[in-house]
Image (cartoon, rainbow, N blue to C red):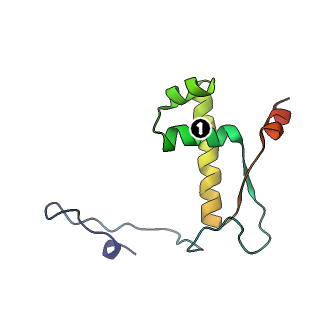
Amino acid sequence: MGWRNRRRHGRRGRFPKPISVEKAPTTDMFTPTPEGNQEAICIEPAELEALRLVDLEGLSQEEAGERMGVSRGTVWRFLQSARKKTTQALTEGRRIQILSEEAGQSKQN
């Protein structure tokens, strides 16, 4: 890997620097049902909603908190957890299971 897979955009500017990748991916495709008996990674609906609002819709954490009815700090915590779980699933080739709303409610009580 490195500079061969990267290129300049247009004629001007510097050539891109090589990027060092410490750990190469173990799989070349993400599938929701990987082979093997790896346990699924569970993500809560609130984590998924925070991820959608901030990363997909481009809202600030404060704006996402207002839409979700929680503080900015809570949105930050949801984002950290969701991003970690998503990254773990992608790098380890594991399934992501979205928990139901009822499971999230009973966990809080």
Q: Give the class, few, some or many, for how many residues have Cα within 10 Å of label 1's Cα (few <14, many ≥20).
A: many
Q: Secondary structure at mark 1?
A: helix
**Which corner quadrant holds the N terminus?**
bottom left
**Which corner quadrant holds the C terminus?**
top right
What's the residue at 65%, 40% (across, down)? 47
Residue highlighted by disc 1: 50
| Three-letter residue code for mark 1 | Ala
Please state the horizontal and vertical placement of residue 26, each as a whole percent of the image: 59, 74
Q: Nearer the viewer, residue 7 or 17?
A: 7
Where 60 falls versus 34 (above or below)? Answer: above
Where 25 falls versus 55 (above or below)? Answer: below
Q: Quadrant of residue 27?
A: bottom right
Please state the horizontal and vertical placement of residue 38, each as a whole percent of the image: 77, 67
Q: Nearer the viewer, residue 30 or 22?
A: 30
Residue 4 placement, left or right of 65: left
The number of numbered badges drawn on the structure is 1
Q: Residue furthest left?
A: 12
Where 9 falls versus 43 (above or below)? Answer: below
